[in-house]
Amino acid sequence: MSLALTWMLCIACGLTGAAVLVFGLRDYAVDQFVARRFREHVSSSLPAPGALARLRVLLERFGQKIAGADSIRQLREMLLQAGYFAPGAAFLFAALRLIATLAAASVMLLRPFLKSGTIAPGDTTLAFFFGFFVYRGFTLFLKMRSESRQREIRRELPYVLDLLLMVLDSGVSIDQALHHVSQQIGRVSPHTAHMLAQYIADTDDGTPYDKALDRLAQRMAISEGRDFAGLLKQNLFQGGELSQPLRRLVADISEARLANAREQTGRKAVLLTLIMLVFFMPVLMIAIAAPAVTDVLGTLQHVAQDMRGTKQ
């Protein structure tokens, strides 16, 4: 019964893969036909897209079909926090994650099948768990990447805002100050410098200031960055003083970083205590109790020898 169920599962997976392949090839053919007609009538001088670009389009379409709205919304937010701003990045990530999961599970099933010609239920269970670990590994990698980027931006923002305040106090406009700061912080604050350069490029291309600032807040993807973009938008469209709100924002960011450092220090102290209990306490107990245990064992041995001598 288990062998029949395993074969049914394999056949279902094969049929699903074949159906996905057929639909993908059909969509690819339609896309190529439309792209060729478009190049012929509108942009015949442009080169045809490369193989990697076509593969990316196929993966994004596959991700659109397999991913739900809620999962795509969460993935898009995490990808923005991790620094991936492409419109189809969420669909591409979903497709690659599923393909890697199925490939890992298939490899785990293929090895025993080639060896013995059958797939045991234990091998199926192992393949399921291995695929699940690969699936979760993609999500954990994205989460770690987003957290690392958020820490870097929070580390860079106080220095960037202090420099921006110094430039603003000299009497220049906000655009000139942002342009100057983006050129000066490339080495010490690469993430913030790149985002400010993209904001300046958007405004130079004719993007309205409100939309450019919204994109800047979206690229920063942290609450402090959204507050910074909101202060710039308020000053540009409603006027008012900018120096004092920026100083308060710098103070808030510094206090938040200090509180975060204290929290992490407290966690490290707890971890050090646990490590000491796990590794040091057994050794300490052995060092303290070993002499007493040795004396007791020696006494018992002497008593046993005396009892044997008395019987003889």
Image (cartoon, rainbow, N blue to C red):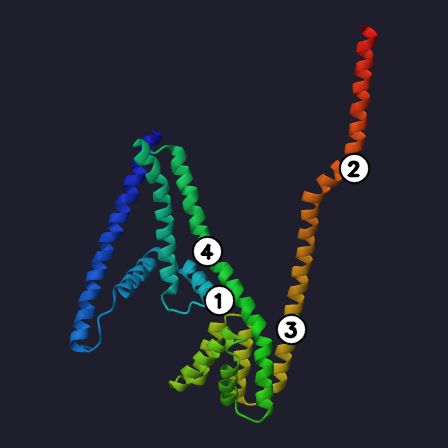
Mark 2 burial class by Cα count in 10 Å: few <14, some 14-19, many 20+: few
Mark 3 burial class by Cα count in 10 Å: few <14, some 14-19, many 20+: some
Left/right of residue 249 with respect to residue 181 in the rendered view: right
Q: Are marks 4 and 3 in contact (CB under 8 Å)?
A: no
Numbered circle sitting on residue 139: 4
Q: Are marks 2 and 3 in contact (CB under 8 Å)?
A: no
Query: Going from the N terminus, do you reach mark 3 or mark 1 first?
Result: 1
Number of the front mark, 2 or 4? 2
Task: Tell which of 101 and 306 is nearer to you.
Answer: 306
Disc 1 marks a residue whose amino acid type is Gln
**What kind of element bears circle 1?**
helix
Task: Tell which of 236 and 274 is nearer to you.
Answer: 274
Query: Going from the N terminus, do you reach mark 2 or mark 1 first?
Result: 1
Disc 4 marks a residue whose amino acid type is Thr
The residue shown at (29%, 42%) is 12
**On screen, residue 259 above or below 41:** above
What is the quadrant of the C terminus in the image? top right
What is the quadrant of the N terminus in the image? top left
**What kind of element bears circle 4?**
helix
Disc 3 marks a residue whose amino acid type is Ser
Numbered circle sitting on residue 220: none
Q: Are marks 2 and 1 in contact (CB under 8 Å)?
A: no
Query: Going from the N terminus, do you reach mark 2 or mark 4 first?
Result: 4
**What kind of element bears circle 2?**
helix
Disc 2 marks a residue whose amino acid type is Ile
> What residue does disc 1 label?
81
Disc 2 versus disc 4: distance between alpha carbons? Answer: 47 Å
Disc 2 versus disc 1: distance between alpha carbons? Answer: 52 Å
Numbered circle sitting on residue 288: 2
> What residue does disc 3 label?
254
